Image (cartoon, grey):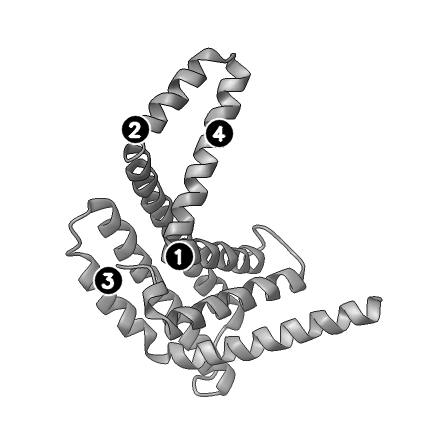
Amino acid sequence: RNGASAGVLASVQQLEAHLSLGRKLLRLGSSAEALEAAKRAIHLSDMVLRFCVTLSHLNRAMYFACDNVLWAGKTGLVPRVDQEKWSQRSFRYYLFALVVNLSRDAYELQILMEREASGKRAKGSENGRQLRADNGLQQLGLRLQIQLRLLIRVLRNNPPLLLDVVKNACDLFIPLDKLGLYKTNPGFVGLCGLTSSILSILTILHPWLKLKP
């Protein structure tokens, strides 16, 4: 049983490594692309989205730049690259970009949940009467239940947002582990990277699944 588990773990890590190499090759021109995306995001009308999207693209540009330096050092194009220093630097930019991305996702979720709730005013007033009729603990439980159902409905009706939340959440464990902020086992990190890679491929194959802007 342990041998089989080790084999599955090795397969997952090998597959994630191959996908990671493919991502690195695609990243060679990604820094300039991220900077261009940041320039476009400055013109967004929503102030919160403008801040989050612009900051995310700037951090992604720095992350890609550090990653390119690492790649150049490993291939021998740039000698005497301090791999540890540049790796830590790149993962810090990566982590900050993901935190900003998740903040943007939370903001989008809040807007959509408020919009969904306002569209169900009759149901909301009925829930309000039920909340007033129950005791404090039941009120809290019912409020949480209503919010959870609302969250599930919003995510189900917005696949791009759902995929972005899952992808960012999976990606988050990678820099947390590499920076030593939240250590997990290599199998879990590999699984998170594999899941993120598959979701990225899905958004390439089906562009409507990519969260915009």
The residue singled out by tag 2 in the image is: 121
The kind of residue on which mark 4 rests is: Leu
- Measure the C-alpha gap from mark 1 to mark 4: 23 Å
Q: Residue at image x 20%, y 45%?
A: 47
The kind of residue on which mark 1 rests is: Pro
Residue 8 rendering spot, x and y as whole percentages: 72, 71
- Measure the C-alpha gap from mark 3 to mark 1: 24 Å
| Numbered tag placed on residue 23 in the rendering | none
Residue 62 rendering spot, x and y as whole percentages: 35, 65
The residue singled out by tag 4 in the image is: 144
Image quadrant assignment for residue 211? bottom left
Mark positioned earlier in the residue sequence (4 or 2): 2
Q: Residue at image x 56%, y 62%?
A: 192
The residue singled out by tag 1 in the image is: 159
Residue 71 rendering spot, x and y as whole percentages: 46, 79
Mark positioned earlier in the residue sequence (4 or 3): 3
Residue 40 rendering spot, x and y as whole percentages: 18, 63
Q: Residue at image x 44%, y 17%?
A: 131
Mark positioned earlier in the residue sequence (1 or 4): 4
Taking depth in this image into account, of 111 and 84 the one nearest to the observer is 111
At numbered mark 4, what does the secondary structure look like: helix, strand or loop?
A: helix
Mark 1 is surrounded, within 10 Å at the Cα level, by few (under 14), some (14 to 19) or many (20 or more) other residues, namely some
Furthest residue in direction right, as rendered? 1
Above or below — where is 183 with respect to 109? below
- Comparing labels 4 and 2, the label whose residue is closer to the camera: 2
The kind of residue on which mark 2 rests is: Arg
